[in-house]
Amino acid sequence: MKVAAVYTHILDHVLDATFESASMHFSRRQHCLVEVVCDDGTTGWGECLGPALPNAAVVKAYATALVGQDPLQTEKIWLDLYNRLRDQGQRGLTVTALSGIDIALWDIKGKRFGVPISTLLGGRFRDSVRAYATGSFRREGVDRVEDIAREVAGYRREGFHAVKIKIGFDVEEDLSVIEAVREAIGPDLRLMIDANHGYDYLEAVEVGRRAAKFDIDWFEEPVLPEHISAYRAVRADQPIPVAGGETWHGRYAMHEPLATRAVDIVQPDICGVGGFTEIRRVADMAALHGVRLVPHVWGTAVCLAASLQFMAALLPNPPRRDPIEPILEFDRTENPFRQAVVQSPIEHVAGVVTIPDGPGLGIDINREALSHFALKEA
């Protein structure tokens, strides 16, 4: 079996209503899927976190070195491709593009042996996971406090046990949102806050100290991802556990935050950190330093499926009779191709998601949806 071709699929949808986080304005959803085809007809699928067109360009740059390789040699291929762009790209797009390729190769490997990727990773510790709802972005033309409180109340009715809300804008308004959300969901649901690195150190500490009374599970990306020392300071100077990691690509980027305990919870995204090959290393590093791991998830059902396969095989840490179970980030924002790209959507039932058990990622791609949502060139 050899790799015969590598393709990218840019999916595109103009949103009915724009929304924004502290770091980004969304007027459309775009995602890059990677398709790796072998000479025996076996096809693997992956996804890249981040800007779709630049990711596709880097995937194509890697493709010439990938064609002709044995797709089962995932470790060898990962290192070879990484080294080709290493001097100019230890992080960022070179790793996010490599992530999509690596996921596709593991999908092929699972199909080759007729087992889910979680089996290849060492076996399943769980067949389902609880999910938390992510949403509550800022929208134009509405009262933000009322809008988000109404939104999260809906997540409670759907059966989610936890919600994550977006902050990182104005300190006083953000605190009003947090208070309104806690009132809307009641005292029993878990609540997380995500600043999308919108604060500086002083703002983050103020928010953390004042929001702690609302029983916050974690404070995600309080400051810029490059400012590891600021992460450590925020963690030390306010009481809410600090989380981060979706923008730290690869184990080298993860080393300092983990080794210096800049975070209490690390959040690698399998479509950005380097795929299955690399996220395993990050999980081992996190366990070594006693840092909890909760994956970041953003994208299509391909990303969901990959994240679920990884979570199925994630070792309990610490091991005990009633272990701390990983929870799945479940994006609730507008994205019509999120589930459409697969034949059987990956949905939650009362806040619980079943992990696919078919070969590879355990999904079948809907090519009609790929065609329907394909980026139309201007």
Image: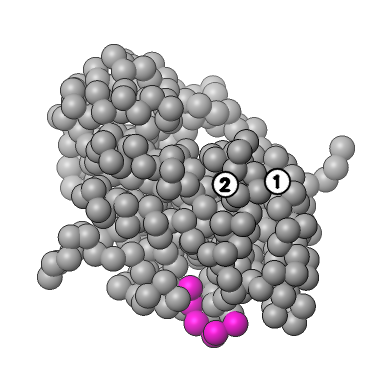
In this rendering, does residue 23 appear at all? Answer: yes
Judge whether residue 115 is colored magenta: yes
Q: Position of residue 329 (x, y in %)?
A: 40, 51
Position of 17 with respect to 180 (left or right) is right
Residue 2: quarter of image: bottom right
Tell me which residue sits at (72%, 42%) in the image.
Answer: 53
Tell me which residue sits at (25%, 38%) in the image.
Answer: 261
**Disc assigned to residue 58:** 1
**Does residue 85 sit above or below 2 in this rendering?**
above
Q: Amino acid at mark 2?
A: Val
Query: Disc 2 on helix, strand or loop?
Result: helix
Q: Amino acid at mark 1?
A: Val
Q: Position of residue 203 (x, y in %)?
A: 31, 16
Image mark count? 2
**Does residue 59 sit above or below 6 in this rendering?**
above
Judge whether residue 73 is colored magenta: no
Image quarter of the N terminus: bottom right
Position of 38 with respect to 352 (left or right) is right
Q: Magenta stretch?
A: 112-117
**Does residue 361 sit above or below 370 in this rendering?**
below
For label 2, the crowd category at 10 Å Cα-Cα, with few meaning under 14, some 14 to 19 and many 20 or more, is: many
Q: Position of residue 245 (x, y in %)?
A: 40, 41
Position of 223 with respect to 331 (left or right) is left
Query: Observer-nearest residue: 95 or 310?
Result: 95
Question: CB of mark 2 within 8 Å of CB of mark 1?
Answer: no
Residue pointed to by mark 2? 95
